[in-house]
Image: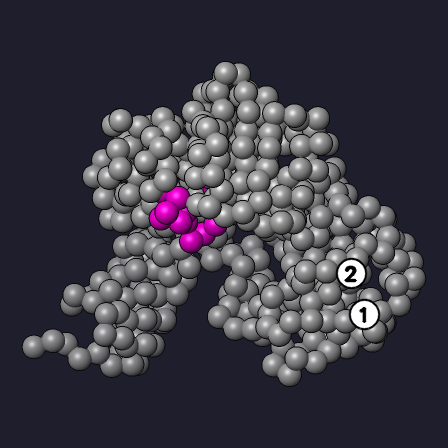
Amino acid sequence: MKRQWQIGEILQVQITDLTKNGEGVAHEDGMTIFIDRAIPEDLVVIQISKVKQQYLKGKIVKFLQPSQFRREQDCPYFEICGGCQWRHIDYLFQMQMKRQMVINHLKHIGQIDHAKQLVQPVIGMKNPDYYRNKAQFKVSPAGIGYYKRKSHYVIPIQKCRTQSRVVGQKEIAVVDQWINESRVTLYDEKKHRGCLRGIVFRSNRRGELLLSIIVSNESELDKNELIHFFTKKIPNIVSLSININAQKGNKILGKTTKVIWGRAYIIEDMCDCYFQISAASFFQVNTDQAEKLYQCVIKLADINRTQNVFDLYCGTGTIGLCLSKYTKQVYGIECVPEAVDDARENATRNNVHNISFYLGKAEDVLPTLLEQGINADLVILDPPRKGCAQSLINCLIQCGISKIIYVSCDSATMARDICLFTQGGYQIETVQPVDLFPQTGHVETVVLMSRVEK
């Protein structure tokens, strides 16, 4: 007879696995149990908090034997903040778990039996803190901060260990001071009323700051006061803008940005290229690790000046521009108009003439280029989290391009797509995970595939 589980039931369990959301995994009488903040090798007493048909959830009541991979907390917000799901785990073990996550996805979703032999050790950081070049803060009467875990309640913070040191306790305190002194009304998400919706900082490795004030309308802002206050209090600000978001919901940035002081962007350099970053631009939030990621792509590409490259889902052109000096021609395709504008501007800034950018969905534009007789020796795929359109995968398989590099921010959807490529005549040569998001369950992955059937 199947066991009937009860909320409040007490169990002793051994944690054997970990989810990307920071839940430990245990098994009891054929049921999987997810335990918040537990990690592999923890021996714990738990209380069942949720009963579902396929799984249970539990809360730790007592540690009987803490895992050797558990570490002391160094952040006062960890227990309530939703930002760092893995901060309680030793960093070397984090990288081991991320590698195993990629292996599991390739094996179980991608149907790759020899996944363990293909996946290389994760490229990590020497110091896995203070790496984010973009800080998005929500606002509350008590100060700016982040959402509490699994809620839309704002937790005010004084500093964050994942943000760049350029956005520290001083900068956060300055914003809090401005909110208090200006008496600007705060946006109420439920009632869709109020002015101030959020604050975005962007920084580069030179220490320059871009600050964007997100509002539902401009009626309560004194622009001269804004300029005087922030440029006096934060002297390394080089760009100050207002972003207008009148839409309902909790999305921070709107479509309209007005620069009220300084430049419209900051500049970052990677792989001997320069990229402009505006308030709304997409740019990898971990610059140091993104550079390692692009260097990995360049190495695996192994191309020469006689070869062409298709850079699909190219964004602002970062990968294509980094590859351009090694190849004959790069064709970038991107469906976001603002990203294409930034990509073309980045090409001009870097004096790169052997790269062209096309606006549209990759699955629509690529067949048109192929019909025009444009072909390539290498394809770079860097899709969003949902992965590639199946029609695009079918098109690539049909045209038989000899080499594909797949860059993924979600190894589960990547494994799903890789399965289609392997069924269509490609084999995996190597898989290289790169840790762009230390202290979280996310991992970036680079996969090199080659054509084995014609």
Q: Residue at x 55, y 36 (%)?
A: 332
Q: Residue at x 63, y 32 (%)?
A: 270
16 horizontally vs 389: left or right: left
- The quarter of the picture where residue 183 lies is bottom right
Image quadrant containing the C terminus: top left
Let me know if residue 385 is in the magenta part.
yes
Q: CA distance from mark 1 to mark 2?
A: 8 Å
Q: Position of residue 52 (x, y in %)?
A: 27, 75
Callout 1–callout 2 Cβ contact below 8 Å: yes
393 horizontally vs 324: left or right: left
- Tell me which segment is drawn in magenta: 382-393
Q: Is residue 44 above or below residue 2?
A: above
Q: Residue furthest bottom?
A: 191
Count neighbours of disc 2 (C-alpha within 10 A) and say few if under 14, some if 14 to 19, many if 20 or more.
many
Count neighbours of disc 1 (C-alpha within 10 A) and say few if under 14, some if 14 to 19, many if 20 or more.
some
Q: Residue furthest left?
A: 1
Say which amino acid is labelled 2.
Ile
Assign a secondary structure to mark 2.
strand
Q: Position of residue 163 (x, y in %)?
A: 63, 51
Count the marks. Answer: 2
Assign a secondary structure to mark 1.
loop
Q: Residue at x 54, y 32 (%)?
A: 331
Residue 94 visible within the image? no
Q: Residue 242's mark? A: 2
Q: Residue 180's mark? A: none
Relative depth, front residue between 231 and 190? 190
Q: Position of residue 277 (x, y in %)?
A: 69, 44
Applied colour scheme: one colour
Say which amino acid is labelled 1.
Glu
Q: Which residue is mark 1?
A: 218
